Image (cartoon, helix red, strand yellow):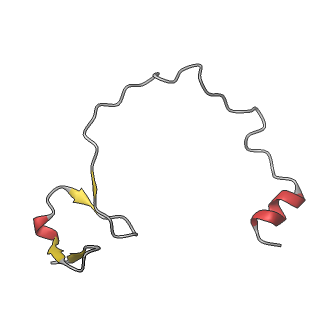
Amino acid sequence: MQNAKLPNGFSIASSQLGDVSSPADGIPVESAKLPVRFGVLQGQAWIANDFDAPLPDYLLDAFEGR
């Protein structure tokens, strides 16, 4: 059994949390149980044809901290 640490210094046993998951930062997140509606954003977003093209060297260097 694992204990979850709360910001106020208290802890709670994982068996008392019920149906929640705990991400890396330690804040419990309840799972969403809403139905998925496909096509809601249809026509409101686009992806460029060269989306997966390699980045220019200067931009790749910036991401890598060089």
State the image quarter where residue 19 is shown: bottom left
Taking the spot 14% from the left edge, 59% from the top edge, the residue there is 18
Q: Is residue 1 above or below residue 63?
A: below
Taking the spot 34% from the left edge, 70% from the top edge, the residue there is 26
Task: Spot the residue most to the front.
Answer: 8
In the image: residue 21, left or right of residue 43: left
Which of 32 and 7 lies nearest the eye of the viewer? 7
In the image: residue 61, left or right of residue 41: right
Q: Residue 32: where, in percent of width, then height?
A: 28, 43
Taking the spot 36% from the left edge, 64% from the top edge, the residue there is 23
In the image: residue 32, left or right of residue 46: left
Q: Residue 39: where, in percent of width, then height?
A: 47, 22
Q: Residue 34: where, in percent of width, then height?
A: 27, 35
Task: Spot the residue most to the bottom.
Answer: 9
Q: Is residue 41 above or below residue 31?
A: above
Task: Spot the residue most to the top.
Answer: 43
Which of 43 and 25 lies nearest the eye of the viewer? 25
- Screen quadrant of the C terminus: bottom right
**Number of numbered tags placed on the structure image:** 0
- Screen quadrant of the N terminus: bottom left
Q: Residue 30: where, in percent of width, then height?
A: 26, 52
State the image quarter where residue 52 is shown: top right
Task: Spot the residue most to the left.
Answer: 16
Taking the spot 40% from the left edge, 69% from the top edge, the residue there is 24
Q: Is residue 38 above or below residue 1?
A: above
